[in-house]
Amino acid sequence: MPKLLQSISVYALANIIGQLFSFALVAVYTSVLTPREFGLLSTIEVAIFLCNSFVLLALDRAAQRYYYDEDEQYPKRVINTVFWLVFGWTLCLMSVMIILDAWLGLSELWLSQANILGWIIWIAFGFAMNSLTLVYCQIHQKPHVYLRFILCKVIALGVLTWWFIYEQDQGVQGYLHAQAVTFAVLACIAMPILKVRFTGLLSFSSIRPLFAFSLPFVPTLISSWLMGMANRLVLEQEATLEAVAIFSLAYKISSVYFLATSAVALAFTPTVYETLKEHKTLTADVYALLSKLHMALVLFAVLICLFAQPMLSWFFQAEYQPSFALIGPLLLVHYLSAYMGLTSNLTLSFFKRNVHQMCFFIVCSVLCVGLNLWLIPHYASYGAVLASIVSMVFLTLIHWTATRRLKLPDMVIRQAMIGAGILLGCCIVNAQFIYESFELNAIQALLMKFILISIIVGAAIIHLKGGQRV
């Protein structure tokens, strides 16, 4: 447990550094670029994300899974094979895109900027190297190496952004140059970390199973992205700019929860995979550990839900106050996603049920888009939140049903229901009409929240000391 907590802390620190640096870069871009240039930059970032899915082809997921394969040779050669697959595929894509760009002018048609698709593919390769390095550090349980890698990325990108955008005044081209040079440097740093070799560890026989595992993840990742972005895309078309701003602010604040949940998942995954490899199921010790992590995640979500509003009201104008009412419901969406990330997502991946996973996400993304199109014109940002909640609850129920039918380790749906119930209770307690009905002032409301937190913590301690599986 102490080693796990240390890993969680280091991964969380790496995530926080990365997020804070991203926010700092936004401030730099908006201070130098015109609104039109910043809009183009945002569009390029979306293009990079989409290209990353086609550059990496989810081979990082395959590398993570096949590291724990029963074949003892896989752990030695899988990372090396994946690195050269991604590198070779990137060179092919870059060549094709550069030729098509020169012939058809695709960059200008898609992004209103000439000859940048090759840059985008290379930057996507850089993000792929970041993902592969993370997987290596995760399976070898070396979080400190990943933290140093992130620090190198932050320093290099910070210096190069200052040089190309501030000193050279290259605008959007400066963004592309800074990103491309940074990831070229990081690729050189990643190679010794990944222990990449030019010969000796390539395995052509493993290419087919790697692709068979990874390719279904590509539509899965795109569907997951669509579930997260559909509400904002529909809001921009069907609602007012004020509704878009209110929802976007609430989403950004609630995304702080992701920093904790992703760190927990990164540290917990090797434990789950090693246990499944040895026992083909999850042991009582792993379930007990899952219960403790679950309680910690619930408590963190409750703290954000109850205390974000009084803390943030000092920093935001009255026009943005409606955003605070959406934070709690959005935390419920993030919580259910995080819980599946610790349970069903891991077991489905380990037992290679990727096609099932792909179908689940495609169905739920279609449901999410349909609900957004139906609800947002009537309820604006509240409709977007409701669509996200319904689709995520539906995905959770599908995962639970699938793990039972496929006879996979139990995802303990009761635990998820208890956590969701606690968060719903906090949302009700946090609602403005409660304060108005009971005529509570700010001090009384704060006291009520501390009492609620004490009850939740007390119940969690009693549960954990009892050693029961919820």
Image (cartoon, rainbow, N blue to C red):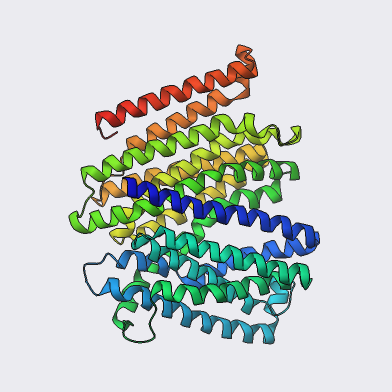
Taking the image as shown, residue 34 lies to the left or right of residue 83, namely: right
Q: Quadrant of the N terminus?
A: top left
Rendering coords of residue 253 (x, y %)? 60, 42
- Residue at image coords 27%, 40%: 288
- Residue at image coords 73%, 78%: 114
Going by the picture, which residue comes out furthest to the top? 438
Using the rendered image of the protein, determine whether residue 215 is visible from the camera's viewpoint: no
* Image height of 36 relative to 282, above or below: below
Residue 336 found in image quarter: top left
Asked whether 303 or 329 is in front, the reply is 303
Rendering coords of residue 295 (x, y %)? 38, 35
Taking the image as shown, residue 347 lies to the left or right of residue 306, namely: left
Going by the picture, which residue comes out furthest to the left? 279
Residue 290 found in image quarter: top left
Rendering coords of residue 422 (x, y %)? 44, 29
- Residue at image coords 64%, 50%: 232
Rendering coords of residue 158 (x, y %)? 65, 64
Taking the image as shown, residue 361 lies to the left or right of residue 171, namely: left
Using the rendered image of the protein, determine whether residue 332 is visible from the camera's viewpoint: yes
* Image height of 59 relative to 382, above or below: below
Asked whether 36 or 154 is in front, the reply is 154
Asked whether 216 or 420 is in front, the reply is 420
Going by the picture, which residue comes out furthest to the right? 34
- Residue at image coords 51%, 61%: 222
* Image height of 467 relative to 45, above or below: above
